[in-house]
């Protein structure tokens, strides 16, 4: 099963993946990365910080533009991908496996997942 069969996507182009340990991995979809172009800078939050659904939790800059990245569900940061901060171009190469951004412990309820789409539906909405 590919990762795109397991993720949920937001209208603002973030993805969320439920991990086996009940945490969630959050990153940018391949579409978002393609639209940004060559990524040159990434700013991620510190471990322990809590965000509400739809709050800005990170910033990404490419040669084209700077964009805010929004939290798809409420959660507390449990891990940050320092490797992608050191080498932001990793996002262009592999936004799902090596290019994940943060891991969170979800603090909101299940209803926060209701407006997220499966990857296939997300791709259809882009067309």
Image (cartoon, helix red, strand yellow):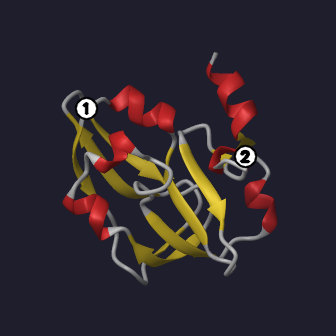
Q: Secondary structure at mark 1?
A: loop
48 relative position to 21: left or right: left
Which residue does the image show at 49% across and 57% down from the upper left?
55
Q: Nearer the viewer, mark 1 or mark 2?
A: 2
72 and 24: which is toward the camera = 24
How far apart are the two marked residues, 1 and 2, measured between alpha carbons? 29 Å
Q: Determine whether 12 is above or below 51 in the image.
A: above
Viewport quadrant of the C terminus: top right
Q: Position of residue 96 (x, y in %)?
A: 50, 50
- In the current view of this chain or complex, which residue is farthest to the top? 127
- In the current view of this chain or complex, which residue is farthest to the front? 1
55 and 69: which is toward the camera = 69
Categorize mark 1 by other alpha carbons within 10 Å: few (<14), some (14-19), many (20+): few
48 and 94: which is toward the camera = 94
Determine contact: label 1, label 2, CB under 8 Å: no
Which residue does the image show at 42% across and 78% down from the upper left?
49
98 relative position to 16: left or right: left
Earlier residue among tags 1 and 2: 2
Q: Position of residue 46 (x, y in %)?
A: 34, 76
Q: How many marks?
A: 2
Which residue does the image show at 43% across and 84% down from the upper left?
48
Q: Position of residue 61 (x, y in %)?
A: 24, 42
Q: Which mark is residue 5?
A: 2
Which residue does the image show at 79% across and 51% down from the upper left?
114
Q: Secondary structure at mark 2?
A: helix
18 and 72: which is toward the camera = 18
Determine which residue is flagged by label 1.
Answer: 65
Categorize mark 2 by other alpha carbons within 10 Å: few (<14), some (14-19), many (20+): few
Q: Determine whether 112 is above or below 14 in the image.
A: below
Q: Position of residue 98 (x, y in %)?
A: 41, 57
């Amino acid at each position: 099963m590919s990762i795109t069969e397991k993720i949920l996507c937001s209208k603002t182009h973030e993805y969320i993946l439920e991990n086996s340990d009940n945490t969630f991995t959050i990153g940018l979809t391949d579409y978002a990365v393609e639209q940004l172009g060559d990524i040159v800078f990434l700013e991620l939050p510190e471990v322990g910080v809590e965000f509400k659904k739809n709050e800005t939790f990170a910033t990404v800059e490419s040669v084209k533009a700077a964009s805010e990245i929004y939290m798809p569900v409420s959660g507390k940061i449990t891990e940050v991908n320092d490797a992608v901060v050191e080498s932001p171009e990793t996002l262009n190469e592999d936004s799902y496996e090596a290019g994940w951004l943060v891991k969170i412990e979800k603090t909101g309820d299940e209803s926060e997942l209701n407006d997220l789409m499966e990857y296939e539906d997300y791709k259809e909405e882009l067309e």
